[in-house]
Image: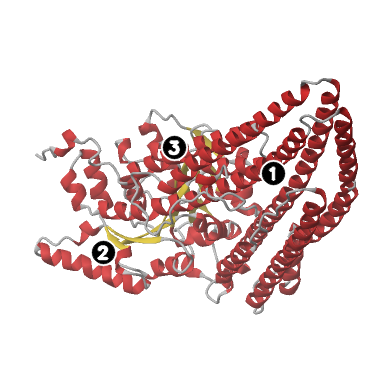
């Protein structure tokens, strides 16, 4: 009888997946960052130091922290043990299998496992018949009433496992029906399902499944994507072009006994290799290589040879290939057998995932937060500095009035009124600036409108006709992408011109009317250019000789076009949003400084008028302005203390994650170039 490992009695987490403490640390870190950012934002809002555009940026940053997900995709052909691997890594704490992994029960449709606290625990299944309608998965996500919904009880894991078995369901349909669903090709016979004696073929009952369940790992922001084989991936362009590229890592599961088969190689070359994903190759079922007549050294040598051969076939480094036995690992965790878990080799894979994914996620989020906080502090600093400048002008005037006659005060009041009238001349200048700015912005936004995408796709359709099965398809698609890149480049050029115009106008307004306007850097549209190039590379695979036959299928053709238009629109709408936000920030800065200048002149005039009416008013008003200046200095200190707390936490990262090297030391820089320790200077 197997005895329990004594270590388990002292350390209940001994068999816990290595991702668990890392995800815990990452989640706690994100929540702490969110709290720190909330405190900073509340302080700046209460001090009226944020414009509406800056506040929106802060809220967007907070939303990103709150909703950040870590997406891990599992990709494999049928019967490679992929579902069992998911069970072993993520769901052994359920005490049983969650995803079906018994013989004869194979996951037939893509499955997403995640948790959204705004939704009930459910299993949502999209009927396969929806493929006839041509809508993309993204469109179907917004029409959940058409999905088959199964309510889940978080306290009943056995009921969850029984419900999830539904993802293995199939249907018998005629060849004509399979063809209409895009699951039968007359040209590519090798990809077709086998024909039964009654002339029918077996197809998945469901097109897609989403499991919304409050599992601890899913609650921590993990999203698991299970994709079932080459045919399922190839039949849904959105998987290749949307879901898989959005994953932070992909685990490509192979059978250790079979190595890289032809269909495995097709999956790798068409959907994973060279696509920019962080890929881990898993040689599962290494226990099947056990030979009772061989020595332990012989078995280890056989496993290593299979790993080396796999790496050479896929053209990757050997250290990206991990031999494991998912079934042995799951059994070990269910039985509390630490030795058997070690023998399954799964901990090595989990360690690689933890050390690769989590620090990278932390660095990206930390960089985003640091940049966002720096922008908020620069915005607040400019407003504080402007208010202090106005106070300094008032204190200089008021101190100059000590011991002066009423006539002198009247002269000062007359001068303030004259300065106010002079300042009001800028109203016409600002109106002209707004008009020019609006005209230039409209031209820029036209280059980034969805209409440009529609025109480019329409031109492609005109070139290729009703079907994209055309010898010129690849070249025509390349021309479409070049046309859209040209629109991005034009928008970038227009942003440069807008920036030059605003810089010149700000310089004049600052010199003539006492503003302190400073333009933020223009948005970098190069990232959207690169995203278009990634889309071009992703779609170009469908115009290759081996894939273009599938383009003749009407349903696939239409779905591919819908997906293309959706992704291109997303790129252009996001770019347009960044350009609009940048211009809105500039406009908001002008408006806020204009209002503040007017208020300053009004306060100065009112103070002088009160001084004329009461002899003791001068010293009281001077004390008020000095006290206000001290409050502004305190606000500077507190803003930078709060900002430093956020940035230091973002820089440190979670203590439980492997430390990153090569980080630059933390330095808070004010918008005037001063360091945080000398912020009072």
Q: In the rendered image, which residue does mark 1 sit on?
A: 53
Disc 2 is placed on an element classified as: loop
Mark 3, Cα crowd under 10 Å, few <14 / some 14-19 / many 20+, is some
Proximity of marks 2 and 3: CB atoms separated by less than 8 Å: no
- Is there any visible trace of residue 466 in the rendered image? no
- Per the image, the residue denoted by label 2 is 257
* Residue 295 picture location, percent across and down: 9, 64
The answer to which of 322 and 291 lies nearer the viewer is: 322
- Ranked by sequence position, the earlier of labels 3 and 1 is 1
Instruction: Please name which of the two marks, 1 or 2, marks the residue nearer to the observer.
Output: 1
Earlier in the chain: of badge 1 and badge 2, it is 1
Tell me, yes or no, if residue 360 can be seen here: yes
Tell me the tag on residue 513.
none
* Residues under numbered marks 3 and 1 in contact, where contact means CB atoms less than 8 Å apart: no
Separation (CA) of disc 3 from disc 1: 31 Å
The reply, left or right, for residue 107 in relation to residue 254 is: right
> Where is residue 27, by image quadrant?
top left
Q: Nearer the viewer, residue 606 or 640?
A: 606
- Determine which residue is flagged by label 3: 219
**Which residue is depicted at the point 53% across and 36% down?**
149
Q: Quadrant of the N terminus?
A: top left
Q: Nearer the viewer, mark 3 or mark 1?
A: 1
The percent position of residue 369, horizontal first and vertical second, equals 52, 47
């Amino acid at each position: 009888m197997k005895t329990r490992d004594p270590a388990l009695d002292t350390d209940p987490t001994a068999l816990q997946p290595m991702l668990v403490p890392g995800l815990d640390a990452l989640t706690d870190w994100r929540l702490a960052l969110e709290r720190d950012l909330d405190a900073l934002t509340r302080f700046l809002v209460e001090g009226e130091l944020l414009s509406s555009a800056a506040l929106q940026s802060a809220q967007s940053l907070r939303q990103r922290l709150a909703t950040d997900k870590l997406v891990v995709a599992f990709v494999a052909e049928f019967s490679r043990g992929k579902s069992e691997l998911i069970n072993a890594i993520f769901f052994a704490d359920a005490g049983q299998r969650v995803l079906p992994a018994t013989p004869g029960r194979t996951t037939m449709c893509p499955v997403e496992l995640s948790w959204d606290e705004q939704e009930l625990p459910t299993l949502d299944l999209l009927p396969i018949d929806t493929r006839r309608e041509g809508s993309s998965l993204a469109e179907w996500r917004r029409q959940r009433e058409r999905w088959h919904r199964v309510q889940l009880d978080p306290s009943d894991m056995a009921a969850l496992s029984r419900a999830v078995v539904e993802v293995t369901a199939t249907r018998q349909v005629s060849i004509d029906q399979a063809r209409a669903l895009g699951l039968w090709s007359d040209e590519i016979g090798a990809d077709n399902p086998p024909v039964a004696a009654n002339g029918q073929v077996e197809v998945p009952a469901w097109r897609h499944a989403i499991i919304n369940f409050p599992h601890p790992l899913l609650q921590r922001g993990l999203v698991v994507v299970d994709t079932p084989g080459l045919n399922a991936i190839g039949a849904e362009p959105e998987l290749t072009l949307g879901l898989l590229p959005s994953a932070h890592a992909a685990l490509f599961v192979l059978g250790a006994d079979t190595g890289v088969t032809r269909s495995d190689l097709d999956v790798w070359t068409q959907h994973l290799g060279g696509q920019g994903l962080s890929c881990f190759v898993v040689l599962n079922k290494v226990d099947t290589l056990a030979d009772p007549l061989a020595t332990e050294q012989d078995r280890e040598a056989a496993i290593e040879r299979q790993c080396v051969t796999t790496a050479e076939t896929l053209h990757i480094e050997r250290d990206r290939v991990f031999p494991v036995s998912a079934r042995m690992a799951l059994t070990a965790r269910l039985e509390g057998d630490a030795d058997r878990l070690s023998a399954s080799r799964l901990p090595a894979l989990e360690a690689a995932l933890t050390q690769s994914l989590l620090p990278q996620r932390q660095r990206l989020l930390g960089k985003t937060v640091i940049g966002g906080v720096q922008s908020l502090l620069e915005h607040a600093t400019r407003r504080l500095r402007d208010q202090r400048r106005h106070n300094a002008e008032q204190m200089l005037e008021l101190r100059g009035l000590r011991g002066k006659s009423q006539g002198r005060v009247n002269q000062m009041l007359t001068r303030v009124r004259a300065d106010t009238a002079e300042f009001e001349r800028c109203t016409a200048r600002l109106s002209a600036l707004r008009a020019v700015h609006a005209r230039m912005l409209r031209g820029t936004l036209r280059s980034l409108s969805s209409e440009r995408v529609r025109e480019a796709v329409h031109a492609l359709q005109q070139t290729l006709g009703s079907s994209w099965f055309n010898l010129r398809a690849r070249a025509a698609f390349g021309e479409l992408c070049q046309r859209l890149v040209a629109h991005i480049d034009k928008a970038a050029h227009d942003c440069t011109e807008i920036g030059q115009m605003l810089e010149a106008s700000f310089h004049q307004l600052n010199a003539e009317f006492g503003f302190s306007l400073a333009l933020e850097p223009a948005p970098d549209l190069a990232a959207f250019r690169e995203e278009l190039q990634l889309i071009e590379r992703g779609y170009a695979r469908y115009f290759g000789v081996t894939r273009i036959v599938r383009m003749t299928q009407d349903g696939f053709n239409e779905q591919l076009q819908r997906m293309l238009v959706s992704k291109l629109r997303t790129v252009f709408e996001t770019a347009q949003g960044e350009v609009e936000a940048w211009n809105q920030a500039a406009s908001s800065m002008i408006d806020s400084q204009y209002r503040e200048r007017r208020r300053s002149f009004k306060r100065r005039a009112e103070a002088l008028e009160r001084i004329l009416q009461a002899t003791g008013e001068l010293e009281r008003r001077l004390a008020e302005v000095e006290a206000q200046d001290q409050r502004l200095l305190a606000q500077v200190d507190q803003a930078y203390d709060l900002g430093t707390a956020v940035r230091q936490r973002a820089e440190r990262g979670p203590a439980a994650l492997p430390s990153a090297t090569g980080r630059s030391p933390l330095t808070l820089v004010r918008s005037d170039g001063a360091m945080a320790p000398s912020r009072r200077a």
